[in-house]
Image (tube, coloured by chain):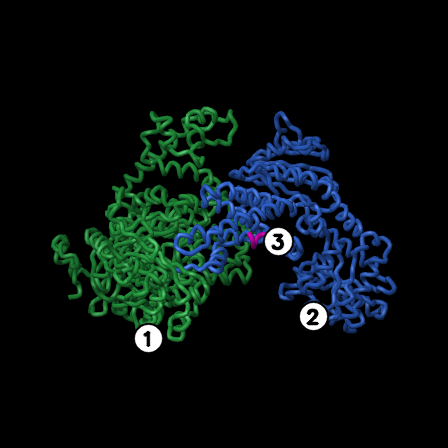
Amino acid sequence: MLPCSWGLWRSAIHTLKTFRASPSARGLCIPTRAVCDAETIFALSSGHGRCGVAVVRVSGPASSMVLRNMAGLTQALPPPRTALLRRITDPKSKELLDRGLVLWFKGPHSFTGEDSAEFHIHGGPAVITAVLQALGSLEGVRPAEAGEFTRRAFHAGKLGLTEVEGLGDLIHAETEAQRRQALRQMDGELGRLYQDWSYRLKRCLAHVEAFIDFSEDELIEDGVLNQVDSSVRQLETEIERHLKDERRGERLRTGVQVVIAGATNAGKSSLLNTLCKNNTHTQSMTHCRANPHFNGQPCMSALSHTPKYAFFLMTKSLFLMVEQADLTLVVVDSTQLPPDPQLVAAFLQQHLSTVLPSPEAGMTAASDKVLLVLNKSDLVPEEQRERTEGELRERPGLPPACFLSCSTSTGLEDFLTVLQSRVKTLCGDPLSGAPSLTQARHRAHLQQSVQALNQYHQYRDQDLALAAEGVRLALTHLGRITGRVGAEEILDIIFRDFCIGK
Amino acid sequence: MLAQKLHLLRHNVLSFVSSRTGSDFTRRQYDVIVVGGGHAGTEAAAAAARLGAETLLITQKIMTIGALSCNPSLGGVGKGQLVREVDALDGLCGRAGDAAGVHFSILNRSKGPAVWGPRAQLDRERYRQFIQSELLSTPRLTVLEGSVDELLVSQPNPEEPGHHRVTGIRLVDGSHPILSSSVVLTTGTFLSGSLFMGQTTSPGGRMGDAQSCAGLSYTLKETLGLRVGRLRTGTPPRIVKESVDLSLAQLQAPDKQPTPFSFLNTHTRCKPEEQLPCYLTHTTPGVERVVRESVHLNCHIQQDAKGPRYCPSIESRVLRFPGRRHQVWLEPEGLTSDLLYPQGLSMTMPPELQLRLLREIPALHRAEIRTPGYGVQYDFVCPTQLTPSLQVKSTQGLFLAGQINGTTGYEEAAAQGLWAGVNAGRTALSLPPMALSRTQSYIGVLIDDLVGRGVTEPYRMFTSRAEFRTYLRPDNADLRLTPRGFEEVGCVTLRRYKKAVSVRDGLQEALMALQSVALSSTRWREKLGNISLSENKSTTLNGLDLLQYKDVSFEMLASAFPECLSQYFEYSQRLKIEAVYRPHCEKQSREMERIRSEESLSLPSDMDYLSLPVSLSQEVREILDRVRPNTLGAATRLPGMTPAGIIHLLNYVLRTGQRNRHTEHRNRSSQKEGEKGQLCASNIPISQ
């Protein structure tokens, strides 16, 4: 399962490439009409990874339009809540994407209380990606934000007050997962690109606002707006080029990120080599790298199928790496364990707190992201090992621990089983991966940003307040990727760049 | 006799005294007491009286009521919007500006009507006279000269939140207290104020006026335990007009046709041809040299600890942006005044150096100073301790407005004064307090920013602070505020209300008439001549669509369809603006709705966030505990607040709302209570 999952994600990148070429060009053709009163959203509602059937949910006023367009229903809609086997096609190119079940839910009798539709399609990533891309190309339809379906259900009164508490936790979990993912992406080249755009757009807005608020009283050079004109145009060109450029998408993280952490000589490199040497894993492990230069305190290596990304991470601080990882393998030298099995748990607890960031966050939160590998088990007396294993099994506060000997491969099978089930859970978790969804969300916001910047040029000479509105809107959309920008931040730039009196 | 009645305008004294009976002189009980006679105080007193509250305005010197302490001008970009809104709520400053203006201009004329800034240079004397005579003729309003020694507080009303309740004031020389249900403090720069010039400092809030007594400051800080901060401001030297070589400055003419501030006025008191010009000149490297040489003699600048982001004085300008030319406006102080006000030359250096500095500017090379510039440092009450009705959270019946809340500017003070006066009046009359939404007015933006975020530098209004700038325009302030001001708030007189309603109906009719004329774009081109329409030939466009085009004016359409449109000529400019902005405002309506529903969910001010039995992180609890947001909307705007935290808070509020419906009822208008059902269905803020 483990190689499968990794291999699967690799193939997903390729399918992404093929399917992106057309939608990216198409995406720009979305008419510049603003999103109307209630937007229609879509998302993959079933888990990621290999599965038999995947469910894509659509909710909002345009759901019936989506259903007609995607399932070729020219006439009446199917009766509500009745499954119908249809050919699912791309609404623009009419290309066949899949055959699957479609369901129609007329509001308010749906999960969200709005008009909704469901597509039950085959679970391959290629199919899923194609359907999501096709949905994103429809006007007035956009990828859902984290927890948005649930939130809409809440607003429609579909969830009782007592369920709200749960919703809060859910949104917390979702945004937490999103935050981790964003952190990962923001750290890379893509993140720097978005941040750069956001910074430049902020400056553009600050200069337009300064011109509006202060040019009559203060000395603001006439060239300010001309500079903004060219900056906005430059930004538009860059974002548009980015939207067309498929290669950048590859740099997005799309797999499970595993970090191997442990003290010097605990056997991290040996573990990596063992995993790579194991025949069944060779294929997916060719890109694995260990960094031999890390010999500081707790030393660690990263495993990822995206070599550039892994390399980039190596230069960052250690805790940051662990925080961003989906899974951390903490390698411990078994010979260092206390001989008395009763003391082992406390020892490991203490050890983890030095390796993992924010130990006060509680082991329960971290434990499903952490596996303990007790290496060099061949050097520990068998009897002591068994007693320790028994002791650790009764400690729910600790992450699962596996005894393993990298030199004799003893315990490797058991360790792989645990590792595989962990990775499977992570891949099945709609929040851990979801690269296509994240990308689709970014695309949507970037496209809306570009459209809003058009408004700047449209009104530049006619009405500067409306032109500024375009820049504000563009920044709002970009801010949904990079973080919100408040009025005070704009004023900071104004007062820094211009001399404004009382 | 302390109850020395208003006797400043000799010709008015008789009518004034005759309108009062002798017993009024010894009255010791009012609904509302307003302390301070500046822009905030006069608006507060007038608003409370309009509402029907028996009001007393106490000021140190009756003669300085309505005095323009600093610049002789009103309005501007952002500030002009505030003046229009104060006027729409029947405040004084708009009409006073029309009566006192001697140079009218609309700033930003080329940048779109949403950001037009109505502005006027004022005649100081006329402004003061207008404000004083307005107050004099306001029923239920008494003016008293005196200095307030202390605020009287007692145990709070247990049914409402707060630790204290204000019961009145005691004057410095007064043996007996004057009682009231609410008190509005508008002390400006007089709260622990000190004046700075060169290396000398003296206590006071304005040069030439007595310092205010320490008692009030003590009550606020010690008795009520309010957190205060310190801010600074300054004013430039006044220059003798004759000594200025105006031929070396650039003439700035006013608008040919003055535009009144007030919705009630069709023209200004000053005739177009009587207007006075302004002059523009610039600083020189010599000015920078004098500033640098005098830094060691300048206490005010050396103590610049707070460091506002903008540059309040010429010293901070040249120190922060060296090597630049800075603008200096030479503004008239009035029709008969022999002084000029050098806008942009606020300074605090010793007087002899001020003269040297001025004379480095060519037009001022032989300038004479009448009164030198000086700096003021004063206490302000951190405004996060206030509710959106501008009442101090911990003290029932105590309202603050103006510079005491950390703002700067006449317009900002007037706006707060009006709203504090409204709520002081409502409290006294046992009506629930009211808040203005930031989606509806700049006054709402101002107050929400103050009470929700606090200040670190004197707060000034900019249009960039308003999210819904395209809707909060100077042209539609009457439609936004006047009907509500009459129907719900009670601060608008019937005469103004009727006028606003007739304008609203007229505009509505005109818009419908415009929509009723629909032609193909080909036919439009035939009718109107050579205009560029982007739509293809067969598209049908109505008059409103057409009015969105840059080159199309209402007059053009009216001449094409005189029978149905010519009767709406008086609205031509407003119709054009409405047509251009309406589609954009409609796009924003959903976002406005969201903000409004958040604002209507109030959070109890005595909530114990640290031990609230809901799942909130310690970090979020501490943020909430520190800022104590008034509404869920304010909470969502706090940096560091998480979406999950908002949901938990919402859940808590809805639950406790169900349990204590009757107590919460007091805090919210009954109409908002009715909307509770809809809140579940509306969009809740989830910031990403």
Tell me if residue B39 is in the magenta stretch: no
Checking the image for residue B200, the label placed there is 1
Name the amino acid, label 3.
Answer: Ala
Closer-to-camera residue (B422/B449): B449
Chain under callout 3: A
Vertical relation: A2 (above or below) B558: below
Residue B250 is situated, as x and y percent measured from the top left of the image, at 35, 54
**Magenta highlight range:** A194-200
Image-based side of A96 in relation to B288, left or right: right
Q: Residue at x 44, y 55 (%)?
A: A220
Helix, strand or loop status at disc 2:
helix
Name the tint of chain B in the rendering: green
How crowded is the residue under tag 2: few (<14 C-alpha within 10 Å), some, or many (20+)? few
Closer-to-camera residue (B683/B411): B411
Q: Which chain is blue?
A: A
Which residue lies under the disc numbered 2? A350
Q: Earlier in the sequence, mark 3 or mark 2?
A: 3
Residue A375 is situated, as x and y percent measured from the top left of the image, at 81, 66
Name the amino acid, label 2.
Answer: Gln
Observer-side mark, 1 or 2, equals 1
Do marks 3 and 1 both belong to one polypeptide chain? no
Q: Quadrant of residue B43?
A: bottom left
Tell me if residue A198 is in the magenta stretch: yes
Helix, strand or loop status at disc 3:
helix
Task: For marks 3 and 1, give the CA distance.
Answer: 60 Å
